[in-house]
Amino acid sequence: MKPCEKPLVITINHQIGSGGAVIGQKLSERLGVPFIDREILQQVSQKLNLLEGELEGREERLSSFWQSFGHMVEKMDPTQSLMTDRYFPTDKELFQIQSETISRIAENSQAIFIGRCCQYILRDHPCNFSLLVFADRSARIQRLCSLFHLSPGEADRMIETNDAERSAYIRSFTKQDWLDARLYDLCLNTSSTGVEQACDIIRAAILAKLSQ
């Protein structure tokens, strides 16, 4: 690939059940670029001295009202904690730490990132290829049923919940509609292309952008 001022970074936003994570892994194998996913969670949890499991459920999801209210009360009067004696970051604090972690990795090495508002965080990176992976509802349901052994109804409800939570989270911190095609270099419907063909298309598009 053509050299860039900074290391190449590929940012992937994806609908649940569209195969975005699989595409990220396959691109990593084809391009020799590390696929960075749980490493971000690991680094953030270490920085905050928390277990990964304590943060995992909050990724790309806003805290509930009562969690937010509890944090507010703690700040006003620490003796009236509604949560626990341990410190837990607010959504804003967690987003800031994740952003710093993603930016630091992208500054020093090539990487493929997925989710976590990575497209927005690295929007000014001079060698960023941004990608949106989506799929037809029926294909997403089928994939989730296969992956998690769900009924079609359960998979459909998972999609509904995940889409709503992800949309609210991204809009809250970026003021963007994450499904707006204008935000990306390439948008792919894996229902039409399949995963392998999608990787071929993405690789060609990356090479085309780098050759500009």
Image: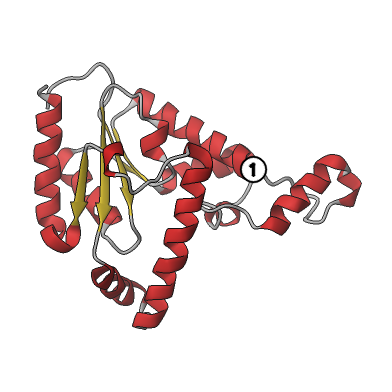
Residue 64 seen: yes
- Vertical position of residue 193 compared to residue 10: above or below: below
Give x and y (percent) for residue 3.
17, 20
Quarter the N terminus occupies: top left
**The one of 180 and 9 positioned closer to us in this rendering:** 180
**Image point 27% across, 24% down: which residue?**
7
Badge 1 is on which residue?
49
- Vertical position of residue 87 compared to residue 163: above or below: above
Give x and y (percent) for residue 114.
35, 46
Please name the amino acid that badge 1 sits on.
Asn
**The one of 170 and 39 positioned closer to us in this rendering:** 170
Residue 41 seen: no
Quarter the C terminus occupies: top left
**The one of 41 and 91 positioned closer to us in this rendering:** 91
**The one of 182 and 140 positioned closer to us in this rendering:** 182
Quarter-wise, where is residue 8 in the image? top left
Quarter-wise, where is residue 34 in the image? top left
- Callout 1: SS: loop
Give x and y (percent) for residue 167.
45, 52
Residue farthest to the top? 5
Give x and y (percent) for residue 69.
75, 52
